Image (cartoon, helix red, strand yellow):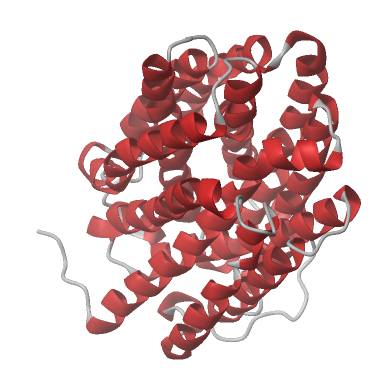
Amino acid sequence: MSESFTPYQRRLFVFLSVATFFEGYDFLALTQILPELRKDMSLDQAQAGAMVAFINVGTVIAYLLVRQADRWGRRRVLTWTIAGYTTFTFLTGFAPNVWVFAAFQMIARIFLIGEYATSMVIAAEEFPASRRGMVIGVIAAFSSLGAIVCAGTVPFLVKSPFGWRTVYFVAIVPLVIVGFARRGLRETARFAGQGARPEVRSLLAIWKTPYRKRVLELGAVWFVAYIATQNTVTFWKDYAVTERGLTDAQVGAAIAIAAVGSLPLVFGMGKLMDKIGRRLSAAIVFTVGALGTFGAYTLEGRAELTVALVLAIFAAGAFLPVMNAFTAELFPTEMRGDGFAWTNNLIGRLGYVVSPMVIGHFARDAGWGPVVRLTAIFPLVAIVLVFLLLPETRGRSLEETAAL
């Protein structure tokens, strides 16, 4: 029987969901304004791919911030990351050229990923094992909901006098809302119960422990998973406009329909993980992702493309709670932040950073379609790695799942 939430757990659930909602909005903004930005700043596909790759470097640098959650505490890191991503997203709207734009967005990504990773650690530590998957899944789904709001509002925001810049100006909203809400946020009981902690921990400290193997195993899955999911959504709007001849309005409608259609599935992912387990859930998500990626960059009709996009957006949103659950559950409390930082932000995000640059390079001559559809093989590789490398963690306490 599922354990009931305490009043504080209910408030925390809402707080983390709201914070992640705005993270999802900000994160998808670049994808939505890419055609307008390329036109405004005279960028070709290769240059756009290189810019996205540079911005994504911030998701790797976030390693330095995420690992501090094991030293400074989860609450402190979460507070700083929310303030940081809001500030630099807002400043992006004032960027006078592509260099400043990319720099501000790269810094914003550091804080965005720091907030997301810390939220997942807090969720894993503060909620009962029987409902941990549901909580992580719903919080992650709110990121997808934020992305939907972004997709639905961008077509209107870019028509304002400030154009694509307006999309970033509205980012001041989360700082005000979350700034008030964070006052009741506590440190997690597991972290607070550790007692004294060392002031400085070596960057390589986790590699001197038996958990180094888990770092490599989880890092490998994250690496493949990011190649498999992030490029499909990032370049689809540009592909649909330039290679399928759809208008901005048609693309906006397709993305909105696909995002809304996939949302109930993403919200249900957490409960599915608690029911059938993390590994089977991963198999479903990545299989759907492979079909979605291939279809979204192969099919021609608007209806067919939209259906494929539903599958792709679902996979891009649903793989995160599965991998977040694995990562948070497979490390002990004293190195949970460090483990998350190494596997996701360093090893995993290398695929996130390098793949857009590689795809943009080849797409300059071949187009987005022929290049991106080839990445449909990576979700299938991810399934194999999950079953070969990762144990099932469903319904077990963090002390059990972290044990070697």
Q: Residue furthest front?
A: 161
Q: Look at 36% across and 22% down and name the residue there.
A: 307
Q: Residue furthest bottom?
A: 183
Q: Position of residue 358 (x, y in %)?
A: 79, 23
Q: Position of residue 63 (x, y in %)?
A: 71, 57
Q: Is residue 135 above or below residue 311?
A: below
Front-lying residue, 319 or 358: 358
- Residue 184 lies in what quarter of the image? bottom left
Q: Position of residue 65 (x, y in %)?
A: 71, 66
Q: Is residue 200 left or right of residue 156?
A: right
- Residue 126 lies in what quarter of the image? bottom left
Q: How many marks?
A: 0
Front-lying residue, 279 or 77: 77
Q: Position of residue 253 (x, y in %)?
A: 42, 35
Q: Is residue 234 left or right of residue 289?
A: right
Q: Look at 59% across and 36% down and name the residue there.
A: 217
Q: Is residue 401 above or below residue 217?
A: below
Q: Look at 20% across and 42% down and name the residue there.
A: 275
Q: Residue furthest left?
A: 1
Q: Is residue 213 visible?
A: no
Q: Look at 74% across and 22% down and name the residue there.
A: 359
Q: Quadrant of the N terminus?
A: bottom left
Q: Is residue 237 visible?
A: yes
Q: Is residue 85 above or below residue 358?
A: below
